[in-house]
Image: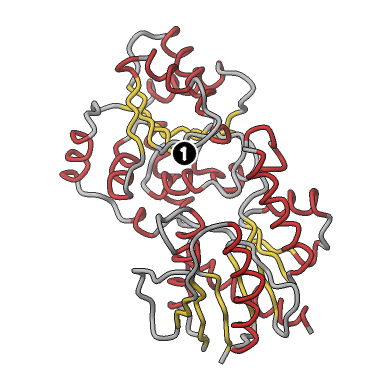
Amino acid sequence: MFRIAWDGRGLVGPRTGIGWYTHHLIRGFEALPEEWSADLYLNHSIADTFSSRVRPRVFTYANTVRLRGLWENMILPWALHRHPPDVWHSPLSVVPKKARFARVATIHDVAFLRFPHILPREYRKYWTKRIKDSCRNADLLIAVSEATRSDVLEFFRVDPNRVTVVHEAADPFYHSAPSPEEVESVRRKHNLPGDFFLFVGTLEPRKNLSFLLDVYEALHARREEVPTLAVAGGKGWLQSGIGERLSALGDKVRPLGYLERGDLRALYAASTLVMVPSLYEGFGLQAAEAMACGAVVLASDVSSLPEVVGEGGLLLPIDGAEPWVDKILELVDNPSEAERLRRAAGERARHFSWERAAVETLAAYRRAVDLCG
């Protein structure tokens, strides 16, 4: 019986990307035929229900820097010493300094080093130290894309043999098509017309909404009647001026705020185009979700996006708006090409799955055990 210990704290509280990563990875493991069991380390109880092979171990603490450090540096090592696994895996990149078992950490991105000016100083400082500690203490690191692996090797000078790639995937929910009635209901709920462009992402500099607004303004300068731009995403950081730009565009742009996945699936499927103009993506989950819904995806040609989008969408540079305007008008005026891209998107999305991620992650665990000696 292979014994795993998972850092499950991403599952606690409002669900973010790392929380969904943890959830879907465990679900993927539950589908594996291999014999395994797992302790799931948490700082609060959770609503998720997993199989009997997953045993929650809850050590509660309030989410402050001091108490989080106490949990990670004292309580967790004590608990793992009492219940030693074959491997510890932290999607939050927390790795005990000393251990009698293999240690694995997932690194989702290093945007804080590639583009330090687009993140708050405290965030950069915290994550730089955390990833540096992981690189020093882990037996094996999992990067969620080849692009992220290259960044880890560049910035942290890690032995390449200690960094492996396991791609993420879209939530399986997005692979099931919404009914026409559901799509129409969601479209009306958000007061969207039949044709609309869609942007999805937290409003923070890395998602590059300011560039997309440049594109949209240039598009309007070229053609008076173009689809509405729907902007879905919660408020982030360092986005002064974005609210004013959105307001200045009036009813041409529809800010939707944070959307639950049911609404998001319907809008991906109904959209004319989904645009992903990011400066940097560790994996590119919005692109993967959109492709799973059969959307036409137009994405920037940076970091992991070429790796994820592949032939399932279109890739463009982000050094000027005009190539985006040209391609958008070409797709709007050529429905047959847009339909071809919808089919290609669905095919590309099936390349990534959480079942495959679980198989590859288990192989990474076994390799970490071998490296640990």
Decide: is 270 above or below 229: below
**Residue at the extreme front of the image, as rendered:** 66
- Give the residue type at disc 1: Thr
Q: Is residue 314 visible?
A: no
Question: In this orientation, which residue lies closer to the viewer: 38 or 272?
Answer: 38
Q: Residue at x 84, y 55 (%)?
A: 157
Image-based side of 163 in relation to 245, left or right: right
- The image position of residue 308, as x and y in percent, is 56, 48
Which quadrant would the N terminus be assigned to in this image? Answer: bottom right
Rendered image quadrant of residue 139: bottom right
User: Which residue lies under the disc numbered 1?
Assistant: 202
- The image position of residue 37, as x and y in percent, is 51, 86
Rendered image quadrant of residue 70: bottom right
Q: Residue at x 61, y 34 (%)?
A: 279
| Label 1 Cα crowd, 10 Å radius (few <14 / some 14-19 / many 20+) | some
Q: Residue at x 72, y 42 (%)?
A: 113
Q: Residue at x 61, y 18 (%)?
A: 320
- The image position of residue 69, as x and y in percent, is 63, 64
Which quadrant would the C terminus be assigned to in this image? Answer: bottom right
How many numbered marks does the figure carry? 1
* SS assignment at label 1: loop
Decide: is 321 above or below 9: above
Image-based side of 356 in relation to 273, left or right: right
Q: Is residue 191 visible?
A: yes
- The image position of residue 163, as x and y in percent, is 73, 63
Decide: is 223 above or below 340: above
